[in-house]
Image: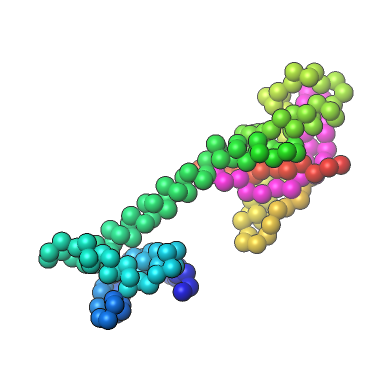
């Protein structure tokens, strides 16, 4: 069973479609907006059932004289709400920080305003080991970091499906001292802003 793909038509979601669905031994004709058919197909794909199975479950819970089409719209909305809740649990600054901290090698997260939003202890140790005049008490507050490509171009490249990590150069600055190197960049799991996670490569 294939996952539903949205139509390139920007108004596709609002178009009502009449379709005949097999529900057990019966065939039922239903009219729903295209977006609800797409969500029902996605639900069926995710749970390895048919759209007819979803229709049957909704019908079994339906109150006498209830509207089956309305019940299916509610079922689709509940599915989307659950998907959104699950996505929010897997994204956000806490998720980014946990991924960075879990890395055993120098790693950090950089936002589009070139601000370090997460880093791990090996990253600070990396900076300290390469700058001779850097006190051991140095924190990330005094560290400036830039990439050798435009941030927007890097984000666009990383969003291409199947592109994998991108290897780019970076420069770290603390006062008048600089460190140059290369890193592997991936998209950070943030919804509200663009950011990358950078894995520093050995020199």
Look at the image and give the residue range highlighted in magenta: 170-191
Compared with 47, 154 (above or below) is: above
Q: Quadrant of residue 36 in the image?
A: bottom left
The count of marks equals: 0
Query: Which image quarter holds the C terminus?
Result: top right
Q: Is residue 42 left or right of residue 192?
A: left
Q: Quadrant of residue 118 in the image?
A: top right
Q: Is residue 172 left or right of residue 31?
A: right
Compared with 3, 167 (above or below) is: above
Residue 11 in view here: no
Image coords of residue 13 (percent x, y): 37, 66
Q: Is residue 181 magenta?
A: yes
Residue at the farthest left position: 65
Q: Is residue 203 left or right of residue 139?
A: right
Compared with 57, 139 (above or below) is: above
Residue 160 in view here: yes
Q: Is residue 113 magenta?
A: no
Image coords of residue 113 (percent x, y): 62, 37
Observer-nearest of 114 and 41:
41
Q: Residue at x 73, y 43 (%)?
A: 199
Q: Quadrant of residue 71 in the image?
A: bottom left
Q: Residue at x 40, y 64 (%)?
A: 43
Q: Residue at x 18, y 65 (%)?
A: 67
Magenta region's main secondary structure? strand
Q: Is residue 189 left or right of residue 72?
A: right
């Amino acid at each position: 069973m294939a996952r539903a793909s949205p139509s390139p038509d920007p108004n596709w979601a609002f178009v009502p479609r009449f379709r005949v669905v097999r529900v057990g031994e019966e065939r039922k004709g239903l009219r729903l907006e295209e977006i609800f058919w797409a969500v029902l197909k996605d639900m069926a794909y995710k749970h390895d059932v048919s759209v007819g199975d979803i229709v049957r479950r909704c019908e079994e819970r339906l109150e006498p004289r209830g509207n089956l089409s309305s019940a299916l719209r509610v079922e689709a909305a509940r599915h989307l709400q659950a998907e959104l809740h699950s996505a929010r649990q897997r994204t956000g600054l806490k998720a980014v920080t946990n991924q960075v901290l879990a890395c055993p090698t120098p790693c950090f997260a950089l936002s589009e305003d070139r601000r370090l939003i997460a880093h791990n202890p090996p990253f600070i140790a990396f900076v300290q080991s390469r700058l001779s005049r850097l006190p051991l008490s140095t924190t990330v507050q005094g560290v400036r970091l830039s990439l050798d490509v435009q941030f927007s171009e890097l984000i666009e490249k990383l969003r291409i499906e199947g592109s994998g990590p991108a290897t780019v150069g970076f420069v770290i600055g603390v006062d008048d001292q600089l460190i140059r190197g290369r890193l592997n960049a991936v998209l950070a799991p943030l919804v509200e802003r663009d950011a990358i996670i950078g894995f520093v490569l050995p020199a």
